[in-house]
Image: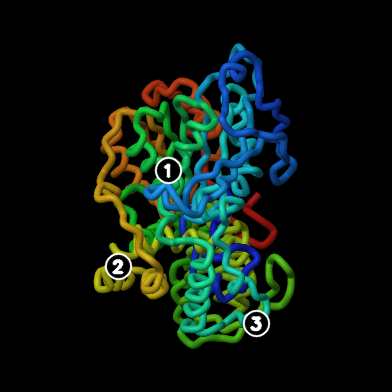
């Protein structure tokens, strides 16, 4: 649950019908030349029990890589094993400044692989990496940790507007295929955090710091619940607390984000002058698409033509995807106005498709987690009432239909309970986030007695990359003191200006 990178429900490249029917979930924002794993006197005292070898991550990032075998069935401690893919970026500073507690980066989705997702975003943690190792672990079911990919969803010959029942049938076939090599009831958040603690122990770290983005915050909070003595500090970016049920409140939270955008445009002199009827034009475009229209656009990845039927539901979900990013929010008034005035939907569609194509996601892991942890908490009548108050289409109905045949794991009784902790915590929110608005972070912060919540007005989902935020996060991890944290450099931050024409913002 990313200033870019909004995960979709199938890995990119994927057939466009999946982009149409199954919108973004939670995601994260998202080189360094590092020294070998042994760095000064500090690392000579640390004795990992697994071998690490020099490797290169995506983009040429130098790291030390290894794997740790864990049982798929942790309770039985027998049977099939999973090789957890691990990458360590050793601290780059001299031995006299390097600390013993690393930073573990937890990816979003659920379904993103940390090694893949963070390799291009390591620069955001360069200040942290000077004094601390950074550790990336592909969650079981992602990346090289027995990635649960779905070959049936990667057939490029599938039509873009495959009917719903055929789409759901493909996802059910994915479930059957994956069940031949994985017990899907054993791929949960609790299993993941238990794996993480095994990695911590195998790398010989006593305590660790956590940074989680979107779904990664759910994992971080679960780790804090299960292993409180092991966490020195935690940063939660785009907070998905125990109260958040994936898909259930997305129409409401997305509508809130869209309403904030309408209001921000109306209050902005340049945007209001160029698009004084932004809200009305958007509603008119949706009304026009009550009668579907045949559309052909260029695929933003391959540039091949995509031919499909555009309807209200599809367009609204593409708009929802655009709300993840403040940069793309700044384009929406122009793109909606263009579609309203000309009937040309291509720029609006391509922007939405580009976002959904930007990050790989492992759908088997996504459904293994959410069909057990979220789907049982969605009641049809309540979900319909939430949807009725929003301009966005269905999110939960198709999700629960897909989950009907997926195995349900036994979830711990305390998994959804509010967490009480005095661990130093920094919570980050974009005020205009369409999936994890600040209210979820406030609910989590209520139980964190040593925490601070920073909200950036006008920004979307995940704010680690905004302005001086990397330095603020680095300072918090250095001191583990949220109360003393100097955040004045954030005070003047403004979301990107609105585009008033295709030439760009007003000069």
Is the Cβ of the residue at disc 2 closer than 8 Å to that at disc 3? no
Q: In the rendered image, is residue 456 in sight?
A: no
* Badge 3 element: strand
Q: Quadrant of residue 186?
A: bottom left
Residue 426 position, x and y percent, is 41, 33
Where does residue 97 sit, x and y in percent of width and height? Answer: 59, 15
Local SS, label 1: helix
Residue mark closest to the camera, 2 vs 1: 1
* Residue nearest the observer in this picture, 429 or 118: 118
Camera-side residue of 396 and 438? 396
Q: Residue at x 46, y 83 (%)?
A: 165
Q: Which residue is mark 1?
A: 193
Mark 2 or mark 1: whose residue is earlier in sequence: 1
User: Which image quarter: residue 331?
Assistant: bottom right
Q: Residues within 10 Å of mark 1 (few under 14, many from 20)?
A: many
Q: Position of residue 109 (x, y in %)?
A: 49, 55
> Which numbered disc, 3 or 1, marks the residue that appears first in the sequence?
1
The number of numbered discs placed on residues in the rendered structure image is 3
Up the image or down, 470 lies above or below 334; here it is: above
Q: Where residue 127 appears, x then y in whole percent? A: 60, 27
The residue carrying pointer 3 sits among few (fewer than 14), some (14 to 19) or many (20 or more) residues within 10 Å by Cα, namely some
Residue extending farthest to the front is: 78
Could you tell me if residue 50 is visible in this image?
yes
Is 80 located above or below residue 291 in the figure? above
Measure how far apart labels 2 and 3 are at the Cα level.
32 Å
For the point 39% across and 47% down, which residue is it? 218
Mark in the foreground, 3 or 1: 1
Q: Is residue 120 left or right of residue 84?
A: right
Q: Which residue is mark 2?
A: 386
């Amino acid at each position: 649950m990313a200033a870019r990178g909004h995960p979709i429900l199938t890995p990119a490249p994927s057939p466009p019908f999946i982009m149409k029917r199954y919108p973004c979930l939670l995601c994260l924002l998202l080189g360094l030349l590092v020294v070998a794993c042994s760095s000064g006197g500090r690392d000579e005292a640390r004795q990992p029990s697994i071998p690490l070898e020099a490797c290169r991550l995506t983009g040429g990032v130098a790291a030390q890589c290894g794997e740790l075998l864990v049982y798929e069935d942790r309770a039985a401690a027998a049977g099939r094993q999973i090789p957890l893919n691990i990458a360590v970026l050793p601290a780059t500073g001299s031995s006299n400044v390097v600390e013993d507690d690393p930073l573990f980066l937890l990816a979003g989705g659920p379904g993103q692989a940390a090694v893949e997702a963070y390799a291009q975003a390591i620069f955001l943690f360069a200040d942290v990496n000077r004094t601390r190792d950074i550790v990336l672990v592909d969650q079981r079911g992602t990346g090289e940790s027995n990635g649960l990919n779905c070959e049936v969803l990667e057939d490029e010959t599938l039509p873009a507007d495959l009917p719903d029942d055929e789409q759901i049938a493909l996802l059910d076939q994915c479930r059957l295929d994956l069940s031949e090599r994985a017990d899907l009831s054993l791929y949960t958040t609790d299993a993941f955090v238990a794996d993480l603690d095994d990695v911590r122990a195998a790398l010989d770290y006593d305590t660790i710091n956590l940074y989680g983005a979107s779904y990664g915050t759910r994992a971080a909070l679960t780790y804090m619940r299960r292993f409180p003595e092991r966490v020195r500090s935690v940063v939660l970016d785009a907070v998905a607390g125990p109260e958040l049920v994936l898909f259930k409140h997305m129409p409401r939270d997305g509508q809130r984000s869209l309403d904030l955008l309408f209001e921000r445009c109306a209050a902005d002199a340049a945007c209001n002058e160029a698009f004084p009827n932004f809200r009305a034009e958007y509603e008119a475009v949706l009304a026009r698409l009550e009668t579907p229209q045949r559309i052909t656009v260029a695929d933003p990845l391959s540039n091949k033509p995509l031919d499909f039927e555009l309807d209200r539901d599809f367009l609204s979900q593409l708009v929802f995807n655009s709300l993840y990013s403040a940069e793309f929010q700044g384009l929406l008034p122009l793109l909606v106005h263009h579609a309203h005035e000309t009937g040309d939907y291509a720029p609006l569609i391509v922007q939405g498709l580009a976002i959904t194509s930007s990050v790989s996601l492992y759908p088997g892991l996504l459904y293994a987690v959410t069909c057990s942890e979220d789907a049982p908490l969605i009641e049809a009548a309540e979900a319909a009432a939430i949807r009725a108050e929003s301009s966005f289409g269905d999110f939960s109905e198709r999700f629960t239909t897909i989950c009907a045949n997926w195995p349900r794991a036994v979830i711990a009784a305390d998994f959804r309970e509010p967490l009480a902790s005095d661990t130093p915590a920094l919570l980050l929110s974009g005020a205009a986030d369409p999936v994890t608005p600040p209210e979820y972070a406030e609910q989590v912060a209520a139980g964190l007695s040593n925490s601070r919540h920073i909200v950036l007005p006008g920004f979307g989902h995940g704010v680690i990359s905004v302005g001086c935020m990397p330095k603020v996060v680095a300072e918090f991890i250095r001191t583990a003191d949220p109360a003393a944290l100097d955040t004045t450099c954030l005070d003047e931050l403004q979301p990107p200006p609105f585009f008033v024409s295709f030439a760009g913002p007003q000069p």
